[in-house]
């Protein structure tokens, strides 16, 4: 069996490569779609693994066709490139990586090594979980870190970036390995690929990394949470960190402009705003109480002229205040109190209360003309209805 040579093992910056097709067969890909799995004598495409997605890109066939690489998976030592069209065995092809995607992944992944190596040397914590997503990268340490410690960790990680230290790959002998204190998630057998990040990390890992720590760019811990007795960090590195900075910067200025202040004054402006809101709410409540008393008098006068009915459209008071008004009126009117609160479009919310009449009966009488929905007790019903307000008022039962 010929094993595919992984070009990124020794050179992570290969973007294009020539290869020969060892085998190609029809398989069921993701979503049970028929596709073709091609094995090559060598490849620069990284197969999904260790929390990192497969590389993207295209394969140019010998006839010049461009086949999109749908997925790359490694199974029992075979690296399978999933394609929509088949390739011929023995055919020469050209592989072209989606370099933006690969470099972005290398920035995140190498940033993770720097943080994990520093944390291991400092606290003795292991990285017990890693996921490199398209938006965010998470890593889990098996011990707690305070906010202050996380800040320090981030600062030190960025210093490693400034130092532009080399990232090197070696395959030490079993004897050499025994002498090494390297990080690894599992017991390893066979050739062990050791990734060294300058003076700061030594880790068994199969993925492609940057060649110099400077390539990682900014390392930013954007969030953290306690997780299984340790801590889970969400990080952004390089281009992603810059994009995030850019978005946050824009947002801050947008918020500041909206509040007519400067970015650094947003917290005090917010405090002032919240204080004013509280005062305003208290003021509105006081006005509401005044309004309830005023309307109550008005509606009682109206009820006397309209056979004991207090019926009105309420477009000022909120629903809670409108209910207070209903509660105040009900004991004082002979027939009933009914309040219509305008909703969306031609709709109204309706509350009817009475101490002498069955409100469900009133509701069912209205139901014939106005698509009434709702219900309640004889003393009070609530519902919704649709129709012209004048017609509704005219049809309110006597
Ligand atoms: Zn790695």
Image (cartoon, helix red, strand yellow):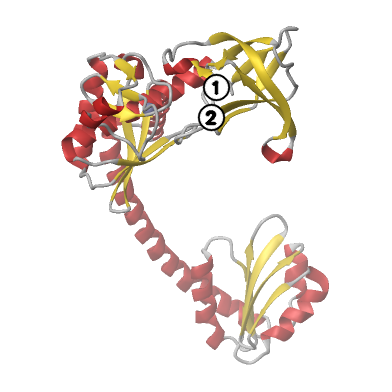
Q: Position of residue 349 (x, y in %)?
A: 65, 67
* 395 relative to 223, above or below: below
Who's the residue at 23% across and 42% down the image? 125
Closer to the camera, 112 or 281? Answer: 112
Q: Can residue 376 be seen here?
A: yes
- Decide which of tag 2 and tag 1 comes sooner along the chain: 1
* 136 relative to 159, above or below: below
Give the residue at mark 2: 77
Closer to the camera, 312 or 270? Answer: 270
Closer to the camera, 200 or 138? Answer: 200
Q: Position of residue 396 (x, y in %)?
A: 74, 76
Q: Position of residue 42 (x, y in %)?
A: 56, 15
Which labelled disc corresponds to residue 3?
1
Evaluate if marks 2 and 1 touch, with contact meaning CB atoms under 8 Å apart. Answer: yes
Q: Position of residue 18 (x, y in %)?
A: 59, 8
Q: Quadrant where the N terminus lies?
A: top right
Tell me the crowding category of disc 1: few under 14, some 14 to 19, or many 20 or more residues within 10 angstroms, Cα based: few
């Amino acid at each position: 069996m010929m094993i595919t040579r992984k070009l990124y093992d020794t050179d992570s910056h290969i973007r294009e490569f020539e290869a020969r097709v060892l085998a190609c067969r029809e398989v069921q890909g993701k979503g049970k779609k028929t596709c073709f799995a091609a094995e090559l004598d060598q490849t620069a495409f990284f197969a999904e693994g260790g929390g990192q997605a497969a590389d993207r890109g295209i394969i140019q066939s010998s006839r010049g066709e461009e086949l999109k690489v749908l997925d790359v998976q490694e199974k029992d030592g075979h690296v399978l490139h999933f394609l929509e069209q088949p390739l011929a065995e023995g055919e020469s092809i050209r592989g072209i990586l989606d370099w933006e995607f690969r470099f972005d992944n290398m920035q995140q992944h190498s940033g993770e090594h720097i943080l994990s190596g520093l944390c291991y040397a400092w606290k003795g914590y292991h990285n017990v979980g890693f996921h490199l997503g398209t938006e965010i990268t998470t890593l889990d340490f098996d011990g707690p870190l305070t906010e202050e410690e996380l800040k320090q960790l981030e600062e030190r990680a960025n210093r490693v970036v400034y130092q532009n230290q080399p990232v090197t790959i070696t395959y030490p002998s079993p004897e050499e390995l025994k002498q090494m204190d390297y990080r690894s998630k599992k017991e390893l057998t066979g050739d062990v690929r050791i990734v060294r990040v300058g003076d700061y990390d030594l880790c068994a890992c199969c993925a492609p990394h940057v060649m110099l720590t400077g390539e990682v760019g900014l390392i930013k811990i954007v969030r953290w949470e306690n997780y299984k007795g340790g801590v889970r960090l969400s990080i952004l590195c390089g281009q992603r960190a810059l994009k995030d900075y850019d978005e946050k910067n824009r947002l801050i200025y947008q918020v500041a402009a909206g509040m007519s202040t400067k970015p650094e004054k947003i917290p005090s402006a917010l405090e002032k705003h919240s204080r004013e809101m509280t005062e305003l709410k208290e003021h509105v409540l006081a006005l509401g109480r005044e309004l309830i008393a005023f309307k109550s008098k008005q509606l009682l006068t109206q009820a006397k002229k309209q056979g004991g009915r207090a019926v009105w459209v309420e477009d000022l008071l909120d629903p809670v205040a409108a209910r207070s008004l209903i509660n105040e009126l009900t004991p004082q009117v002979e027939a009933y109190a009914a309040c219509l609160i305008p909703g969306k479009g031609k709709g109204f919310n309706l509350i009817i209360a009475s101490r002498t009449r069955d409100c469900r009966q009133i509701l069912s009488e209205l139901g014939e003309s106005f698509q009434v929905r709702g219900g309640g007790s004889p003393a009070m019903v609530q519902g919704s209805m649709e129709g012209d307000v004048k017609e509704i008022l005219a049809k309110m039962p006597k």
